[in-house]
Image: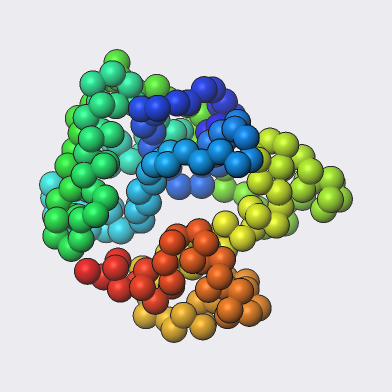
Amino acid sequence: MAGDWAGPSGPGHLSLMGSFLPHNWISHRDDDAVVRNRDAVLQFDLERFFAAAGTLPELKALRPLLEAAARGIEFTGRTAVQGAEAMEAVNGTFGLRRLAAAAELLAVLAESPESERRYLDSRGGSYRLDASEAVGLSRDAFSRLLAKATGADFNRTVTRMRLTEACRLLRGTDLPVSDICYRVGFTNLSNFNRHFRATTGTTPSRYRRIDQL
């Protein structure tokens, strides 16, 4: 799902989702089934790319791609194959090698022909919500509806959002882990560390060290 679009995905699916575009992938499987290497996700700060273009003119070539990603782009054909290979190459690299591998991935996507792009959301990704917006449902009803649509109930969705923000703060600030814990909405440091490890496979402190390599 990407904005108001919904469709099938499977092995080899490659897509780019812009900031604030609601999106989700749902796998229908038995609860005890394990699909190893089911997916790979690479997140980056759009504003940092645009800011860096001021000193690295080569990055300006990415602007059309990243702006188009506001609608969500699914890549097909040769681009999907080459992009998947480039994305897998990012895994396990650090420092300058990771930067080079990520640049190669973005180059493949930026140079992809229109015939190998499918633009998904029809609204252009205009989903910045006012904080006062309400859905007119009780919390329990909303949670059930959310779980039916996305596979994750309200509490799990909120936890994911908190951990995503925690990862951003660990990468982009020098705030102590304890401060980040409380800033993103956790009230207990042990609980924060437990959820963070379960989601990322590592501790907040090690996550920050790995990102800085």
Side of 35 where 62 appears, left or right: left
Q: Residue at x 51, y 41 (%)?
A: 34
Residue reaching furthest to the top: 115
Side of 132 where 33 appears, left or right: left
Q: Residue at x 71, y 49 (%)?
A: 153
Residue 36 in the image, given as x and y percentages of width and height: 42, 41
- Compared with 125, 211 (above or below) is below
- Compared with 150, 13 (above or below) is above
Given residues 196 and 166, the one toward you in this image is: 196
Image quarter in which the C terminus is found: bottom left
- Compared with 94, 34 (above or below) is above
Residue 13 lies in quadrant: top left
Image quarter in which the N terminus is found: top right
Q: Residue at x 63, y 79 (%)?
A: 188
**Taking the image as drawn, is residue 70 in sight?**
no
Residue reaching furthest to the front: 32
Side of 149 where 92 appears, left or right: left
Residue 116 in the image, given as x and y percentages of width and height: 30, 19
Given residues 4 and 24, the one toward you in this image is: 24
Residue 89 lies in quadrant: top left
Residue 66 in the image, given as x and y percentages of width and height: 33, 41
Color style of the picture: rainbow
**Taking the image as drawn, is residue 141 in sight?**
yes
